[in-house]
Image (cartoon, rainbow, N blue to C red):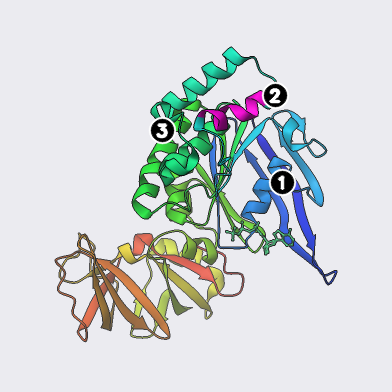
Amino acid sequence: MARVVFKNVEKEFVDGNKETFIAVKESNFTIEDKEFVVFVGPSGCGKTTSLRMIAGLEKQTRGDIMIGDRVVNKLHPKDRDIAMVFQDYALYPHMTIRENLSFGLKNLKQPKDVIAKKVKDASEVLGLDHLLDRKPKELSGGQRQRVAVGRAIVRDPQVFLFDEPLSNLDAKLRVQMRVELAELHKRLEATIVYVTHDQIEAMTLGQRIVVMNKGQIQQVASPTDLYQKPENMFVAGFIGSPPMNFIDVTYENGKVMMEGAQFVLPEHSVQALRAYEGKKLVLGIRPEHLFGEDITMGVPDTYSLTSTVQVVEQLGSENLVYFRVGERMITAKLHPDSDARVGQLKKFLLDMSKVHFFDVKTEKRTS
Ligand code: ATP
């Protein structure tokens, strides 16, 4: 069983001025055996520190870490039965690919024939078998990345740890390697913990995603749940591209009022907003849940707002249309055949079944 558990784990760093900085706060989660879990969040939010604490490369200040059935707090990295793939691959430049793949196993004093078999199996899985006698500099970025993964595979660890392994690849190769990693996970049936700052990578790879911000876990959920039921404005704004729009509204007597529009809410929203009578709220709606009046995709025009189109970006598969409500710039992802033009006063329809409301102070979702 290769579960990974954090119980109230915290990490403090002390800088040169003896100031304490909390990089990871009260972190609690369980990654199940054979699960692919992705840590995502902006730069500096504590993702890599969390991963390095699992690996034992960083010692937690407080709390317990378990891998499998063992508390590993005091275990040396080499005794944790994990393998880590780093962003820069960390290959030995003077060694051939075969030697790079064999190196860790030789150190573990495994028999030669066992090493040869493991290297053969891993290189076949990763399509590296014809490159074994080359040196890393004779390989493409994607091939080097595969060697780094191969070095982890030959060790047959309980848990694989990946730290932004695709960030040095160009956009096209990143997409290809993403698919390969997802396939590899199915094939290996291994527990994988993966760190990235790229929310699309997180959504496509993770069975569950841990969203972090400023050292704190914001939400742990499946990609669908993160998208449909974000717990707070941070998650709502981080997951999804372009991000969710936020509109300042006031709630009164079953109605919401915003600049340029007001409408009576459906019954389920009224129930959920009872405690907010006369108060300000933030309405959240994703760009794909706004429609133009010309192409409504079946959304009734009961809920709409009107604003002047500021910018139109034609992406081929869709048009991104920008307009203002109050201070905020709003994005609508409209059909490519939509007639939106800059300067046009346009009516936008809201799919109310997809709208969320957030508390202004706590930024938590209320409905
Ligand atoms: P990125 O996506 O930029 O890699 P991250 O989410 O992985 O970011 P971490 O590397 O975990 O972030 O760093 C979290 C915070 O801890 C950052 O503010 C960082 O500056 C700080 N930090 C990390 N390592 C140390 C260290 N050894 N000493 C002091 N502060 C550190």
Residue 15: image location, x then y, percent? 79, 66
Residue 138: image location, x then y, percent? 43, 41
Could you tell me which residue is drawn at 48 percent across and 74 percent down?
Answer: 282
Q: Residue 53's mark?
A: 1
Amino acid type of the residue that numbered disc 3 sits on in the rendered structure? Glu
Residue 132 visible in this rendered orientation of the protein: yes
Residue to which mark 2 is pinned: 108
Q: Say whether marks 1 and 2 touch (CB < 8 Å).
A: no
Q: Quadrant of residue 256?
A: bottom left
Could you tell me which residue is drawn at 62 percent across and 63 percent down?
Answer: 44
Amino acid type of the residue that numbered disc 2 sits on in the rendered structure? Leu
Magenta segment includes 306: no
Quarter of the image with the N terminus is top right
Q: Quadrant of residue 227?
A: bottom left
In the image, residue 59 sits, relative to residue 348, either above or below, namely: above
Q: Looking at the image, is mark 2 or mark 3 earlier in the sequence?
A: 2
Instruction: State the separation of the CA atoms marked 1 and 2.
Output: 23 Å
Exactly how many numbered labels are in the figure?
3
Magenta segment includes 102: yes
Instruction: State the separation of the CA atoms marked 3 and 1.
Output: 27 Å
> Which residue range is magenta in the image?
98-106
Residue to which mark 3 is pinned: 183
Name the dominant secondary structure of the magenta segment: helix
In the image, residue 224 sits, relative to residue 149, either above or below, namely: below
Q: Nearer the viewer, mark 2 or mark 3?
A: 2
- Category of crowding for the residue at label 2, using alpha-carbon neighbours closer than 10 angstroms: few (below 14), some (14–19), many (at least 20): few
| 113 vs 75, nearest the viewer | 113
